[in-house]
């Protein structure tokens, strides 16, 4: 029974052998690390650029459109200044420029390490958050945005 719905026939056409379903498409060794290492290279390049081209000097980066049009800080305002301070080792200035972004750098590092370890072991990275967690993240970003635009929350403004 070698029809289009028989997995053995598809496997036989690909490999010339029947019965090795678990081996088809499986990457081994360093090949599994390609994607996480590629992402790390891209992030490192972006941080290296922001580390050398100071966002505190005018004219290097565009102004936030929301800030320009409304005068309101979005949750990302100060993110480039935060990244610059972070990469140059000034954690206090990074937190002052954008505390959420700075926390995000540490979260990214933790998830990336988890991803790398799982890739090395041949396991996929699966992060499935319940809808309540996504709502919580949205609520934190909303509260952060509102508070940093109020007079008593000026410490959170960039």
Image (cartoon, rainbow, N blue to C red):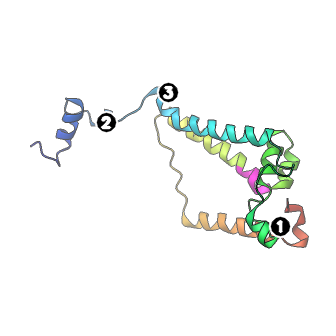
Mark 3 / mark 2, whichever is N-terminal: 2
Q: Main secondary structure of the magenta part?
A: helix
Give the CA distance from mark 1 to mark 2: 52 Å
The mark closer to the camera, 1 or 2, is 1
The picture places residue 146, in percent across and down from the top left corner, at 78, 71
Residue nearest the observer in this picture, 151 or 124: 151
For mark 1, what is the residue? Answer: 148
Cα separation between marks 3 and 1: 44 Å
Q: Earlier in the sequence, mark 3 or mark 1?
A: 3
Q: Secondary structure at mark 1?
A: helix
Q: Which residue is mark 2?
A: 22
Residue 71 appears in which quarter of the rendering? bottom right
Q: Residues within 10 Å of mark 1 (few under 14, many from 20)?
A: many
Callout 3: SS: helix
Q: Residue at x 74, y 68 (%)?
A: 66
Q: Which residues are magenta?
A: 99-104
The answer to which image quadrant residue 6 occupies is top left
Q: Residues within 10 Å of mark 2 (few under 14, many from 20)?
A: few
Q: x and y percent of residue 2 in the render?
A: 11, 42
Numbered-mark total: 3
Q: Position of residue 16 (x, y in %)?
A: 19, 29
Residue 118 within the segment the image draws in magenta:
no
Q: Which residue is mark 3?
A: 30
Q: Name the residue: 84% across, 39% down.
A: 89
Q: Residue at x 86, y 72 (%)?
A: 150
Inspect the magenta stretch and tell me whether residue 101 lies in it: yes
The answer to which quarter of the image holds residue 85 is top right
In this view, the residue in front, 42 or 121, is 42
Q: Few, some or many C-alpha atoms within 10 Å of disc 3 (few <14, some 14-19, many ≥20)?
A: few
Could you tell me which secondary element the residue under label 2 belongs to? Answer: helix
């Amino acid at each position: 029974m070698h029809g289009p719905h028989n997995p053995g026939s598809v496997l036989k056409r690909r490999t010339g052998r029947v019965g090795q379903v678990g081996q088809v498409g499986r990457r081994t060794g360093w090949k599994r690390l390609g994607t996480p290492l590629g992402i790390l290279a891209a992030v490192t390049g972006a941080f290296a650029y922001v580390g050398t081209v100071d966002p505190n000097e005018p004219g290097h980066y565009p102004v936030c459109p929301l800030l320009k049009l409304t005068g309101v800080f979005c949750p990302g305002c100060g993110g480039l200044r935060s990244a610059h301070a972070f990469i140059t080792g000034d954690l206090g200035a990074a937190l002052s420029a954008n505390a959420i972004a700075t926390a995000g750098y540490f979260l990214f590092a933790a998830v990336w390490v988890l991803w790398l370890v799982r890739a090395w072991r041949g396991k996929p990275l699966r992060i499935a958050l319940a809808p309540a967690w996504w709502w919580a993240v949205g609520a934190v970003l909303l509260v952060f945005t509102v508070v940093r635009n109020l007079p008593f929350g000026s410490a959170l403004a960039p």
